[in-house]
Image (tube, rainbow, N blue to C red):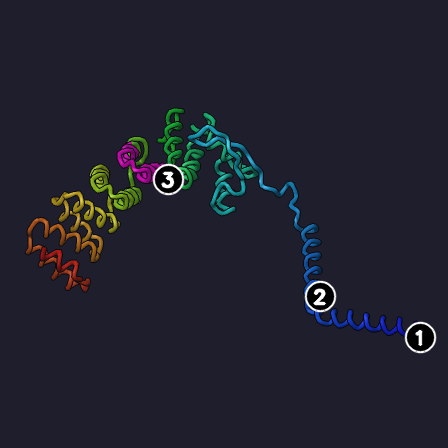
Amino acid sequence: MSNVVVDAKFIGVSSSVMDVLDSVRLELTFLVSFGLLWLLCHIFRMRFGSVPASRKPKVVWTAGPRSGRAAPKDSASADPAPAKARRRSAARLAGGNSSNSSEAILDLQNPTHEQLCDGAWVVAAMQHLCRTQVQRSLELYRDATRAGLDVGALTPPQSAELFMGLVTSAIRLNQPRDALKMLRECRQKSSGVNSALLASATRMCTSKQFYKECLEIYDFVAEDEALVVDDRSVWSCLIFCAVEAREFRRCIDFFDKLKAFGAPSQKDYGNMIRYASTMGDWQMSLSLIHEMREASVEVDNVVYNTALA
């Protein structure tokens, strides 16, 4: 009799356990699946996730151009340029050896006397610094000239790249007077200022609102009568700078030269109408509006209001 009671109790407990397990079967399935996934991920990480020491980015210590405080640099992330560009830049700066880009970074901070006198190295360093450290690019050029760099020995393409970087860097740093000095050095020490350099300087000065300085740069470059400027954007910028600087006597000449190399845009006509309105010349304003209509250039309300002002 006692055996029957024990069996009945055992059957009852087993049934209760099975009922509990049946009610939480979904939760148990989830826990088991999650545990298996975690175990697989852990095994995968242990097998493939470790990075060999040779592949880890090398950390070098270098001093910045301004603060003498040493700071760690990650050679894989110091330069935001793509990896291929970094390797090319490092190869050019380190004399063709691209195995260690951190050496190139250190060379830029503490170049040797031989490197400062090497025109090809200075040009390559300038191209790199103009994208990353604009102020340092100007300092490097001054250091190179003091060390004895012969700018006249550079090839015409090297000279053009060098002074393109110097002039645009000076304007970016809000130093248009220094840009004009660089243009003078370009004329004295190299083959002269080309139209591409003038176009870059003109556009950048206009965007920086250096209107008078832009006109001064043009006046200096225009002393070379052999230089032909066929870039319409140069004349458009000069018209705008002349109006903003209130150098109205120059507007007509710039506008004629612009039309010699292509049709003026709506903004060009708008600037000329501003000039005519300021001078009180309503006949010129009317003539320009007729010219715009003949050239199928839109005459909007701003142009009409400027002409009537």
Marks 1 and 2 sit apart, C-alpha to C-alpha, by 38 Å
Number of residues whose C-alpha sits closer than 10 Å to that of mark 3, classed few (under 14), some (14–19) or many (20 or more): some
- The picture places residue 56, in percent across and down from the top left corner, at 61, 42
**What amino acid does circle 2 point to?**
Leu
**What amino acid does circle 3 point to?**
Glu
Residue at label 1? 1
Residue at label 3? 161
**What amino acid does circle 1 point to?**
Met
* First along the sequence among labels 3 and 2: 2
Are the residues flagged by discs 3 and 2 in contact, CB closer than 8 Å?
no
Number of residues whose C-alpha sits closer than 10 Å to that of mark 1, classed few (under 14), some (14–19) or many (20 or more): few
Quarter of the rendering containing residue 172: top left
Residue at label 2? 28
The answer to which of 244 and 101 lies nearer the viewer is: 244
Q: Which residues are magenta?
A: 156-184
Q: Secondary structure at mark 3?
A: helix
The answer to whether residue 275 is left or right of residue 148 is left
Q: Secondary structure at mark 2?
A: helix
| Res 107 visible | yes
Residue beneath the point at 34% across and 38% down:
169
The answer to which of 140 and 62 lies nearer the viewer is: 62
| Res 225 visible | no
* First along the sequence among labels 1 and 2: 1
* First along the sequence among labels 3 and 1: 1
